[in-house]
């Protein structure tokens, strides 16, 4: 019993505590075996008023009592106490088992729900199955004009303005059978005023059965509905003038009425419309399709949205149609109401938009393919350059040494001269071709930084072009402090873009007197490379032949950046590449 969360104690008929578990000791502040229960637990000198143990001793039945108790910690707790009489072998009551359950959380939850209901904007009340009011909130009191005390002495017929007491009783029975009901009625206030209300009633199986009822004042809504009815003529005018086409058919798909907009399409007067069918206006196959839609809506009782063909003044269009069953006052489906409008242009726009999306997706995939090609190309270049720089040059150097040895051991001047010529040619091949090709394939100098790499590139072109290199001091200082500051792929992209731009200038521009290559770092952490010249320029709608300009854009995209090329005939060209580099601070 000590492991149980309940407090358990056993008292004899003199209210002496015979036993209590550990939880009882904790709740009451110690061991009280042998003491009077009322003194140990309540600090009293006599049996507590309404004591369930006393009641159990009197009638031999179990009794339950809810009470508050202050714990040794000072916390106020709520307990549910159950007293059960204990009998000996002869059936005599010899003691009472008292079990206490802490219901503090339940009480708090009940209080929370009570506050919610009390402060709800809607009226709320609870009634028993005899329609007597058991509980009401302030909102219902304000709504009906009675005080809480007055209402708790009343029943549903006292405020119900439509149903008779017998009808109210039957209605309660209906709610019990169904479990709930939602309906509109009228209540009479204390001052005699009648109000329209919306009622939501739910049956709960407690204390012999009760109904929990929420009541909402719908006077304003009813007035609004009445206004709608009174202005029916105005809305008929609206229906006649809206752009949508509206029609009404009976269960056999025979037209009963339509608005003027629809009648105009069919080139018929609205007054002459009744009695016609779809066969009178449309090709047989299309008419059968319309009638099959009507039949499906009538049989299912559901509203349907349909995109379909429509013939308007001899032209085929696409329309969006909503068809819904028409139900009479007895709940019987008597026909179909249709509303539709022309969506031909909308569908064309959707198709064009879809085609643009497909084109954009293809362009994006093409861009990714070009980036993959760039990456593969650079990887291949690097591999070939590595082979040339390593294996090929090593073998050439070894071959030079072999030729030099043969040259030293030559027995004739002629042989010495020929071997010296071979060795010289090998050196020219290595220094004049193999090394430049290896460098052009992959500029290994970039390991010293992009600034150094661009300087080396400019040196190659300086003999042919008047190139001025400008690298921001901030960027140069940061790179000198950390050679790995800029990722290799970004450095390579910047180098290739500058290389392609200068190559294009050397091929297509002979009049440039001022060429500037500028590399800077923007405040938004963007590396910006600009190559501009004052040559003859070109028309960007018909760029010069070759793939140089395309490669420039591909290199920028491969590094996650972008490139713009602006050129004006007679005024020169500017190539601007912007590559993001969020890891680089700009302070």
Image (cartoon, grey):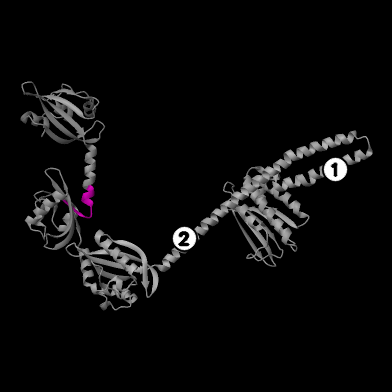
Task: Give the number of callouts.
Answer: 2
Residue 259 lies in quadrant: bottom left
Is residue 47 found left or right of 571 in the rendered image? Answer: left
The answer, for residue 264, to whether it is visible in the render is yes
Secondary structure of the residue carrying numbered label 1 = helix
346 magenta-colored:
no
Choose between 373 and 26: the one closer to the eye.
Answer: 373
Q: Earlier in the sequence, mark 2 or mark 1?
A: 2
- Looking at the rendered image, the quarter that the N terminus falls into is top left
Judging by the rendered image, the residue that carries numbered circle 2 is: 354
Above or below, comparing residue 320 to residue 99 in the picture: below
Q: Residue furthest right?
A: 413
Q: Position of residue 438 (x, y in %)?
A: 73, 45
Q: Position of residue 430 (x, y in %)?
A: 79, 43
Q: Residue at x 21, y 50 (%)?
A: 118
Above or below, comparing residue 55 to residue 360 in the picture: above
Q: CA distance from mark 2 to mark 1?
A: 66 Å
Residue 415 lies in quadrant: top right
Choose between 433 and 106: the one closer to the eye.
Answer: 433
Q: Residue at x 55, y 57 (%)?
A: 363
Q: Position of residue 136 (x, y in %)?
A: 16, 51
Judging by the rendered image, the residue that carries numbered circle 1 is: 424
Is residue 325 found left or right of 539 in the rendered image? Answer: left
Q: Residue furthest front?
A: 284
Q: Give the extent of the magenta segment.
A: 115-125
């Amino acid at each position: 019993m000590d492991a149980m969360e309940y407090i358990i104690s056993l008292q004899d008929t003199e209210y002496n505590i015979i036993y209590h578990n550990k939880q009882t000791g904790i709740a009451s502040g110690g061991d009280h075996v042998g003491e009077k229960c009322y003194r140990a637990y309540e600090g009293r000198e006599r049996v507590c008023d309404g004591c369930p143990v006393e009641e159990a001793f009197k009638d031999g039945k179990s009794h339950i009592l809810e009470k508050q108790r202050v714990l040794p910690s000072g916390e106020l707790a709520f307990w549910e106490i159950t007293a059960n009489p204990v009998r000996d072998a002869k059936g005599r009551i010899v003691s009472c088992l008292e079990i206490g359950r802490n219901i503090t959380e339940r009480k708090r939850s009940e209080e929370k729900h009570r506050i919610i209901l009390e402060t709800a904007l809607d009226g709320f009340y609870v009634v028993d199955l005899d329609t007597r009011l058991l509980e009401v909130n302030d909102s219902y009191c304000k709504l009906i004009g009675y005080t809480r005390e007055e209402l708790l002495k009343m029943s549903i017929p006292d405020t119900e303005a439509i149903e008779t007491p017998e009808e109210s009783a039957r209605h309660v029975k209906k709610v019990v059978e169904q479990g709930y009901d939602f309906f509109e009625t009228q209540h009479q206030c204390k001052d005699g005023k009648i109000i329209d209300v919306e009622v939501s009633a739910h049956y709960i199986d407690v204390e012999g059965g009760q109904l929990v009822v929420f009541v909402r004042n719908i006077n304003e809504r009813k007035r609004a509905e009445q206004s709608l009815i009174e202005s029916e003529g105005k809305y008929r005018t609206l229906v006649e003038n809206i752009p949508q086409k509206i029609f009404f058919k009976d269960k056999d798909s025979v037209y009963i009425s339509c608005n003027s907009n629809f009648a105009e399409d069919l080139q018929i007067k609205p007054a002459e419309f009744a009695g016609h069918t779809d066969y009178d206006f449309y090709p047989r196959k299309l008419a059968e399709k319309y009638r099959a839609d009507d039949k499906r809506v009538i049989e299912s009782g559901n509203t349907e949205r349909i995109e379909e063909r429509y013939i308007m003044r001899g032209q085929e269009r696409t329309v969006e149609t909503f068809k819904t069953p028409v139900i009479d006052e007895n709940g019987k489906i008597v026909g179909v109401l249709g509303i539709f409008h022309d969506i031909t242009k909308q569908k064309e726009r959707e198709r064009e938009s879809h085609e643009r999306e497909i084109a954009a997706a293809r362009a994006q995939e093409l861009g990714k393919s070009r980036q993959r090609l760039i990456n593969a190309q650079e990887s291949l270049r690097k591999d070939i350059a590595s082979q040339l720089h390593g294996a090929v040059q090593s073998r050439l150097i070894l071959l030079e040494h072999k030729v030099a040895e043969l040259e030293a051991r030559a027995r004739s001047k002629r042989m010495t001269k020929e071997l010296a010529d071979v060795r010289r040619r090998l050196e020219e091949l290595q220094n004049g071709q193999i090394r430049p090709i290896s460098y052009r394939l992959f500029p290994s100098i970039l390991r010293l930084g992009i600034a150094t790499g661009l300087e080396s590139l400019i040196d190659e072109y300086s003999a042919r072009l008047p190139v001025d290199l400008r690298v921001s001091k901030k960027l140069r200082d940061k790179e000198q402090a950390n050679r790995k500051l800029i990722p290799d792929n970004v450095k390579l992209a910047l180098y290739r873009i500058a290389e392609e731009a200068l190559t294009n200038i050397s091929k297509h521009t002979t009049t440039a007197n001022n060429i500037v290559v500028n590399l800077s770092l923007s405040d938004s952490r963007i590396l910006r490379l600009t190559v501009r010249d004052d040559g003859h320029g070109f028309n960007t709608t018909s760029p010069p032949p070759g793939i140089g300009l395309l490669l420039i854009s591909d290199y920028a995209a491969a590094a996650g950046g972008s490139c713009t090329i602006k050129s004006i005939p007679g005024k020169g060209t500017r190539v601007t590449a912007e590559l993001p580099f969020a890891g680089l601070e700009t302070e």
